[in-house]
Image (cartoon, coloured by chain):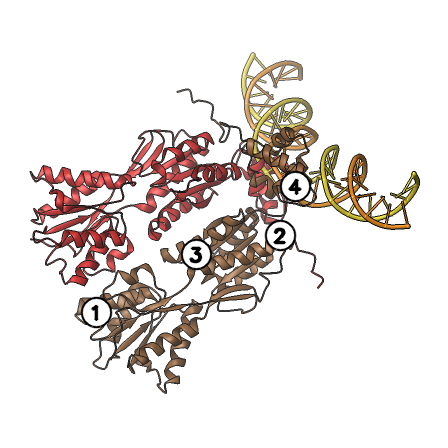
Chain colours: A red, B brown, C orange, D yellow
Amino acid sequence: MAQPPRALPNTANAVSTINDVARLAGVSIKTVSRVMNDEPNVRDETRAKVKEAANLLHYRPNLLARSLAGARSFMIGLLYDNPVPSYVYDLQMGAIKRCRRSGYHVMAEPQDAHAPDLERAIGGLLATIRLDGVILTPPLCDMAVVLQTIEAAGVPYVRVAPFLYPGRSAAVRMDDVRAAFEMTEHLLTLGHRDIGFVRGHPEHGASHLRYEGYVKAMRAASLEPRAEWVKQGYFSFESGIDAAASLFAGGDRPTAVFASNDAMAFGMIAHCQQTGIHVPDDISIVGFDDTPGALLVWPHLTTIRQPIEDLAHQAADMLLARANGEDAGQAGDTRLLPFELIERQSARKL
Amino acid sequence: MAQPPRALPNTANAVSTINDVARLAGVSIKTVSRVMNDEPNVRDETRAKVKEAANLLHYRPNLLARSLAGARSFMIGLLYDNPVPSYVYDLQMGAIKRCRRSGYHVMAEPQDAHAPDLERAIGGLLATIRLDGVILTPPLCDMAVVLQTIEAAGVPYVRVAPFLYPGRSAAVRMDDVRAAFEMTEHLLTLGHRDIGFVRGHPEHGASHLRYEGYVKAMRAASLEPRAEWVKQGYFSFESGIDAAASLFAGGDRPTAVFASNDAMAFGMIAHCQQTGIHVPDDISIVGFDDTPGALLVWPHLTTIRQPIEDLAHQAADMLLARANGEDAGQAGDTRLLPFELIERQSARKL
DNA sequence: TGGCAAACTGACAACGCTGTCAATGAAATA
DNA sequence: TATTTCATTGACAGCGTTGTCAGTTTGCCA
């Protein structure tokens, strides 16, 4: 069983190096380096010569070598702990799209927020692979131990939708309070007065902000939220079912319920379907997030559209600007992105 | 506006290097290297000494330096062009989980299959960042230009659910034909004889395989598929709506329709809801994929569960085995994973 | 036309690790 | 005991880039 000598990867078609280009162009490797990095102080003629040689050889700088020699790794990390595929997908897409423009790559790093060795995991990650920046998403972005670890490693980071520790880092967010306020207002405008609310996972900052918006809007209409119509959920489909079950058990039920994310709204709608409660005739239900499922349920879900992809896009943008020496992405910098109330059929005029 | 001298990333808490460990342990860096890589020929005593020093200093080998010096980059790429978040999410999770165990990282690389410069994009990617392996998903895994480019770069790759060029590379798949056969058989068992079918995107191999399974099952029951009940879809929600519209327009309609993926089944159900056709009383509809939405639609969708995460997990496994010099993951190696028919409420007994 | 600053260019030393190979010491063999 | 073998260790040369700094041109001014 003679095993063939293990072919080393990338041995097949030797990729050309900066040396090859330098030789072909008749300049030093340093000059090639300058051209490839668009640095100044290279004569136009020389620059053209080098570019031609590089094209001819299909030369692409080796990222690993660049990272090792220089101060940048051309990689940013996306840290998340979120079981909603569409959320992660959108974030990742947004980050990748921005990074592509600058020759950067995105390393997706799911992390269990409840892992006992979270600090070691993240610290190890940052020591192992020198990221030029990290995008932190909820709930990781609100965990002191996570922030400390990243700060200790000296890696710039931007938080998406942070709740705790305001101003501690650059951040990108949308106005959850305002959005929840407007959605509640929307229900009020439709004529609803008895409006219930399903809160999200207490570890997620958005849960509190959205609840705040709901309460504010109710009070602005001189209404006081009724405690028995405010249920604790966990942002999951199942918790939406549970919330609906307990909310609709008594005889006295609200005419509308604001579930603070789509998944819970879906759970509620499912419960209604099972129990013969008709949405929106018997009850109006609205969500928050505008996940793809919002068009799958029947009736289609009235909800708030978050600019998730753009959130990550902006976060990456801040990181890259900073990596380029611009003074963006400093602690305190915050970009606020707009949301949109999407009116569909799950809430009706009373 | 004096700008503070730009702090280089990672300058804050100087991470310890192999040199520090070597000095502290009183050995050469090469010995530390041996210990960190679990190489043989190090005395137990020395090994322990080094490990202790490494722990003390929180030493983590720099991946970039390892890659540059050695033959491996400890990264594999996941190339995809698929707009379904849950599909990409599951694949990525599967790959990441397997990679974590071996200290590898996953680089997610969406690629536009129709981009005119696809070859350059992928070639450039592989030249820039030396991946130890690539996981190719549909439809990229069936594109000659993609395979050629990756082969030219000498990078090992595993294809997920390939259709064309069988045996050209290692592959992981499930039996689409068999699954579609069983689903069709299931409808037949429920008493349906008039079964329509909605085909998927012709660029995706799965489209053809699933259709094949449907036809086989029909013929096995001595039934011939009726051309006017076989519609061309594109795996999208909208194409499901269109298919339903044209399928249900005439007076003569099937009693069941097999949409070859969930998204199209959702579109059909949506169309039924809009037009007052009751599922499953008036028509049974089944899908394929078991995406999260299958439990969101009403009635819940009867469908085929694909082991998507495991598909990528196995693909990564083949790549890592190969990177470790084992002779797995060679061209021709194929792992076949099981599927599962999930019976829910969208199809009824006739 | 000489002189000096600014623009350009390249030699060379890192970056933090692994591969190679030679040196050392210990164990096994004669 | 002398010799051979093998396990153990380290010195050193890269890997393909970038940063530093010094050297060489060029352009501009008096």
Residue type pointed to by label 4: Arg
Disc 3 to disc 4, how far (Cα)? 34 Å
Residue type pointed to by label 1: Cys
Question: Would you name the residue on which mark 3 appears?
Answer: B91
Please tell me if label 1 and label 2 are on a single chain. Answer: no
How far across and how far down the image is residue A198, in percent?
Answer: 19, 47
Residue at image position (70%, 57%) is A5
Disc 4 to disc 1, how far (Cα)? 65 Å
Find out whether the residues at labels 1 and 2 contact each other: C-beta distance under 8 Å.
no
Characterize the local packing of mark 1: few (<14), some (14-19) or many (20 or more) Cα atoms within 10 angstroms: some
Question: Would you name the residue on which mark 4 appears?
Answer: B34
How far across and how far down the image is residue B245, in percent?
Answer: 24, 71
B109 lies above or below A175 = below
Disc 1 to disc 2, how far (Cα)? 54 Å
Which chain is home to disc 2?
A
Question: Would you name the residue on which mark 1 appears?
Answer: B272
Find out whether the residues at labels 4 and 2 contact each other: C-beta distance under 8 Å.
no
Q: Earlier in the sequence, mark 4 or mark 1?
A: 4
Q: Helix, strand or loop at disc 4?
A: helix
Question: Would you name the residue on which mark 2 appears?
Answer: A10
Please tell me if label 3 and label 4 are on a single chain. Answer: yes
How far across and how far down the image is residue B152, in percent?
Answer: 60, 57
